[in-house]
């Protein structure tokens, strides 16, 4: 067996792994690179020719795990894409929205560059189009959690619940070569325990090899239990100042989790009545999928639905679809809450709301998700000013806040707890999907304190699995 690392190596985005096992070529993930310094990789062909891939396995629908699928299909991949049923329902929403953003951004960039008589570092064409995304979708096949899927007579995969977002999974592969069998686990993104909406992440007792994320490999979510108290403070103080609360929001899971908490605060009169906009067609459509897949929801959320206290329907909530509705938000007098994508401010409607609010001292930009290095979101939370949005520079005068307790990723303690479920140490643990210092920090913990064999592979490194 051989395993090659094609993304999310010593950085967070672009997850992609190529496993050669028992005559099969298996691609795990096909993610987009979102950090500025790695975006040129999106424009290059996949390092592995599509003809060598027999099946693509997908853990969940975040762009850094699936965002290059339309481009990969355009390059020639025409075989199955296997994922959970909930993910297969979410994937069309995400990929079509991403493709539209690619087309819109390319058109805007071309217009701006023509006006400024210059060229940027990337082509003035979409990375992929809506047509590319539509051609990829018929390849997607949904499967049930925990069901053994035979890829051939010697390789079986099971999709286990990752507790990260709706439909997210960990992959458990059982491979037989000759007389020997090996179990390989790809963690995907490991969720936090006791989070609203989704179930807790699956734990395993045995594996020979583990490919594991380390997004928060050296950090602890200090405010996990106090999310609603922090929301109350930030929202009420901003309303008193007369500003808006602008929340860059990941359309799948994060938007729904924020609505979960806001619905509780509204119903308990912890915040005044105000208009709350979900300005993301993708998030609106994704919310409908959440309501269809009760098998993925935790007991608390199901109970609220049964009691007719649906967390995605509450007074003041406005679901925004059209561009005209989105623009009209800026004409509102008084305070409101605006949730819009993308979550790292790399594209989408959030940029327009930032332009309207980032220079206002009375407004608050509230970050509720991880901000990768090189993204606009990371620059804002790191205190940069001015920041560049749509080719123009804007001074940051708004209040900048960040609540870490919303993270859909396990922190350092959660990662350790997940590993401790193994009765014996795996032969090797490959640490990925984390910035270099995060992954290296967690590797030192594994190697020096636990005595486990953990490594941080580099981009395009290939390992032989004995």
Image (cartoon, rainbow, N blue to C red):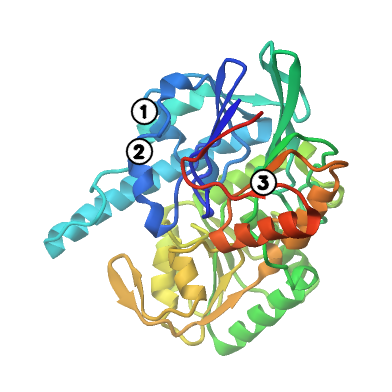
For the residues carrying marks 3 and 1, which lies nearer the camera in this image? 3
Q: Is residue 370 above or below residue 150?
A: below
Q: Which one is in front, 51 or 105?
A: 51
- Label 2 sits on a secondary structure element that is loop
Q: List the residue tagged with mark 3.
A: 212
Q: CB atoms at circles 2 and 1 under 8 Å apart?
A: yes
Q: Which one is in front, 252 or 145?
A: 145
- Label 3 sits on a secondary structure element that is strand
- The structure residue drawn at horizontal position 53% and vertical position 43%, both measured from the top left corner, is 15
Marks 3/1: CA–CA distance: 29 Å
Q: List the residue tagged with mark 2.
A: 128
> What is the tally of numbered marks visible in this picture?
3
Q: List the residue tagged with mark 1.
A: 74
Locate residue 441, reporting x and y percent: 65, 62
Whichever of labels 3 and 2 marks the residue nearer the N terminus, that label is 2
Locate residue 321, reporting x and y percent: 48, 51
Q: Which one is in front, 353 or 117?
A: 117
- The structure residue drawn at horizontal position 65% and vertical position 80%, both measured from the top left corner, is 234
């Amino acid at each position: 067996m051989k395993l090659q690392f094609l993304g999310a190596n010593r950085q967070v985005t672009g997850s992609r792994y190529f496993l050669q096992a028992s005559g099969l070529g298996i691609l795990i993930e096909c993610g987009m690179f979102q950090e500025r310094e790695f975006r040129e990789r999106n424009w290059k062909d996949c390092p592995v020719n599509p003809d060598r891939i027999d099946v693509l396995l997908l853990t969940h629908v975040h762009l850094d795990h699936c965002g290059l699928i339309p481009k990969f299909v355009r390059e020639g991949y025409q075989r199955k894409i296997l994922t959970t049923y909930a993910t297969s329902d979410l994937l069309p929403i995400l990929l079509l929205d991403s493709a539209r953003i690619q087309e819109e951004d390319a058109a805007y960039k071309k217009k701006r560059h023509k006006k400024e008589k210059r060229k940027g570092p990337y082509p003035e064409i979409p990375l992929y189009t809506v047509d590319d995304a539509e051609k990829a979708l018929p390849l997607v096949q949904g499967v049930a959690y925990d069901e053994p899927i035979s890829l051939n007579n010697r390789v079986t995969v099971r999709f286990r619940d990752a507790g990260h977002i709706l439909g997210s999974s960990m992959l458990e592969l059982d491979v037989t070569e000759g007389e020997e069998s090996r179990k390989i686990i790809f963690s995907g993104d490991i969720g936090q325990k006791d989070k609203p909406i989704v179930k807790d992440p699956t734990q395993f007792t045995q594996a020979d090899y583990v490919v594991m994320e380390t997004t928060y490999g050296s950090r602890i979510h200090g405010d996990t239990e106090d999310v609603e108290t922090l929301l109350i403070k930030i929202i009420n103080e901003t309303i008193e100042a007369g500003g808006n609360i602008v929340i860059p929001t990941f359309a799948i899971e994060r938007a729904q989790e924020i609505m979960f908490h806001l619905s509780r605060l509204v119903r308990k009169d912890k915040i005044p009545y105000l208009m709350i906009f979900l300005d993301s067609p993708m998030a609106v459509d994704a919310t409908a999928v959440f309501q269809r897949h009760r098998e993925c929801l935790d007991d608390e959320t199901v109970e609220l639905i049964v009691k007719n206290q649906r967390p995605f329907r509450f007074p003041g909530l406005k679901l925004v679809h059209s561009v005209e509705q989105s623009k009209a938000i800026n004409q509102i007098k008084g305070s409101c809450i605006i949730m819009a994508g993308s979550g790292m401010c790399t594209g989408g409607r959030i940029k327009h709301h930032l332009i309207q609010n980032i220079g206002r001292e009375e407004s608050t930009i509230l970050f509720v998700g991880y901000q990768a290095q090189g993204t606009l979101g990371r620059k804002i939370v790191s205190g940069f000013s001015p920041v560049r949005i749509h080719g123009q520079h804007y001074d940051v005068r708004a209040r900048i806040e960040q609540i870490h307790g919303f993270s859909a990723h396990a922190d350092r303690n959660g990662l350790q707890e997940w590993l401790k479920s193994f009765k014996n140490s795996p032969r090797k643990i490959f640490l990925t999907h984390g910035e270099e210092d995060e992954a290296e920090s967690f590797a030192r913990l594994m190697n020096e304190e636990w005595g486990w064999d953990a490594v941080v592979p580099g981009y395009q490194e290939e390992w032989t699995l004995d």
